[in-house]
Amino acid sequence: MTALLEVEDLRVEFDTYGGTVKAVRGVGFHVDAGQTLAIVGESGCGKSVAMQAVMGLTPSPPGRITSGSARLRGKEFLGQRRVDGKSVCGDEIGMIFQDASSSMNPTMRIGDQIAETLVVHRGYSPAKAFTAAIELLEQVRIPDAARRARQYPFEFSGGMLQRAMIAVAIACRPAVLIADEPTTALDVTIQAQILDLLKQLQQETGMAIVLITHDLAVVARMADQVSVMYAGQIAESGTVDDLFYRSAHPYTLGLKKAVPSTRLGEDHPLQAIPGSPPDLFAPPVGCAYCARCEFAMRICASDDPPPFQVNENHVSRCWLQHSQVNKAVPGLYRQTFDAADEHTEAQP
Amino acid sequence: MSEKAAMSGETAMSEKAALSELPPTSELLRLHELTRYFDLGKGQRIHAVDHVSLSIDKGQVLGLVGESGSGKSTLGKTLLGLHDKTAGSVTFQGEVLPTRYRAADFRRMAPLMQMVFQDPYSSLNPRMTVGEIIAESTRLGVRRSAAAVRDDVATWLERVGLSAGHASRYPHEFSGGQRQRIGIARALIMEPEFVVCDEPISALDVSVQAQVVNLLNDLKHQMGLTMLFIAHDLSMVRYISERMAVMYLGSLVEVGPAADVYFTPRHPYTEILIASNPEPDPGVERKRLSTPIQGDIPSPVNVGIGCRFAGRCPKVMPVCRDVTPQLLPLVDEDRLVACHLYH
């Protein structure tokens, strides 16, 4: 079965005065209809750049997609504007951003901004599109939608504006919704509302959601699948349970230890990850996380680890997962691959 | 006390033991009915901070949480004198501070009370070197030689995890986490008694947040610093503070030991706030029920009588709309709650 959205070996570079930044270095993931994939990573790890490349929004120049493939229902569309006779951006894939107030046009009424999508992609008349926009505002649970559609962004609160932006993104019933840090700027109460809304809309329409975030709690709440990105690569990917309960990459472990426990009596001192991410002008030869990793071995500095299959669908790019490595790392999940076991099995 | 110590981790425990040899905790700062309104004209008035009474003991970290627009930052700025007080008073080390600061008041108070700002990008002057930024406040007190100041700056750069050589660089050469460290060094170089940290970590990445929180925690133990830690990340506030205060629409709704407030919230608003806070655990999140609150925080313009939370409160009673609840202590509990359910 082909996944709804499949991305393979995506590489994006940017030419700058200081040299070429290799922002995305071979990223791959897939997401099925009705599923949520969370892409987790710190700022500068390339998560937004990768998504922009998929959407065809990479500014070029200076950006360049040097290799890769992106397929929607098996059809290649990377670098193309249209797939299956529909445009990729806005029609098949919708996108919402972190800062709703700077993503909306301050001089256009909310309803017109939603209607615009339908006029452009569906060829609706402005009047018909405006009526549809009111329905969309109702769908994103904005009370008094008909009046609200005639208001301007400054009359909306942050949470309402985020809802309006979701309405723009889902106007054409996209197959995939990319949500780039949709709740980072919001309060916890509003964040809970927006996350709930996304979940409900997903159940109603069956769209796939790609959620870009750095907040592990949001990941735990929303995701089915998780990919952890570090320095332009996917460090670890698997189901949400794999990532939280069977972390198989030291970076994932580090992220988990850096947030305080929310449970009574389970306090642990916060452990910060020392140092900062590598310079992507000249990515390190070995593992990108090597310099910050407390479990680094000699091979980590010289060879970039390949993706190791930890379990079905659970992949970690870490040498500690190599079958010949015999290093006990507290809390790090490993496929119990025991040389001794093999030996005993072979004997009889 | 022992329970509190257990809450704040092992390292804190030994420090606590050391602190408890000092004379019993004394009050450093007291706000009495502190109020700050902003007049918009035409009879419109924003009740940003409305009759807030609070006290902070020496060496204590008080976490202040609430939604945006609840007046947390205005409270921090008003108590430092960055905003004039509309009414009420701030008592610091037994001295009532002026309602309106003049230049001389800032000169006198700045070495004692400082602030770390939220946005590490806009709070550092891009045209000054890091050394100049950190050293700026040392010009306020007793005149010191340039060499002594330079040494001090170097020491502080190292204390916050940067290196002395960074003094000649400019803010744009640093990452967000490093800039926040510069902001912390600037606030602490005069060794103040009290620091307001206004959302010092919300602009930072997860791993860097932990670095900054640990740094603040270490400095707190080394210097016996008293802090007002303003944030909206409830789990982080719980981690760093001894006491937690919850603010809604300009007034306090609940104050108590941080862990107690977090794990057994009493005020309906605190309950909702904590129930909305997602946890980094998919098993817990799968069991979580749907959103417990609808709507946004209402406008703080011309707030009338009655409980400010009545409009969104799931446990609202008729009395809530007519009588403004006072922040009163609960029986048998170290807790202040402003809710008619308890009084």
Image (cartoon, coloured by chain):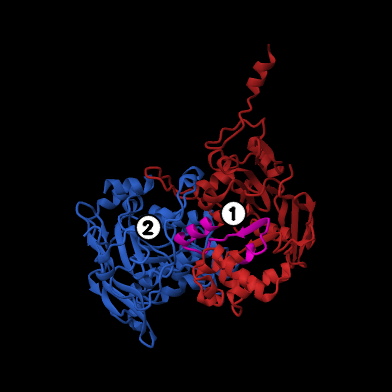
Instruction: For residue A182, say whether it is visible.
Output: yes
Numbered circles on residues, count: 2
State the image coordinates of residue A240 (x, y, percent, origin top left): 57, 44
| Spatial separation of the CA atoms under disc 1 and disc 2 | 50 Å
Query: Are both tags, 1 and 2, on one chain?
Result: no
Q: Is residue A158 left or right of residue B342?
A: right
According to the image, label 1 marks what residue?
Answer: A204
Image: B20 above or below B197:
above
Q: Residue at x 40, y 55 (%)?
A: B274
| Chain drawn red in the picture | A
State the image coordinates of residue A191 (x, y, percent, origin top left): 49, 59
- Residue A107 among magenta residues: no
Colour chain B is painted in = blue
Q: Which residue is drawn at 64% across and 64% down?
A: A171
- Residue A183 among magenta residues: yes
Element assignment for label 1: helix
Element assignment for label 2: helix
State the residue in front, B74 or B125: B74
Image: B332 above or below B247:
above
Q: In this view, does B277 lie to the left or right of B227?
A: right
State the image coordinates of residue A270 (x, y, percent, origin top left): 46, 49
According to the image, label 2 marks what residue?
Answer: B220
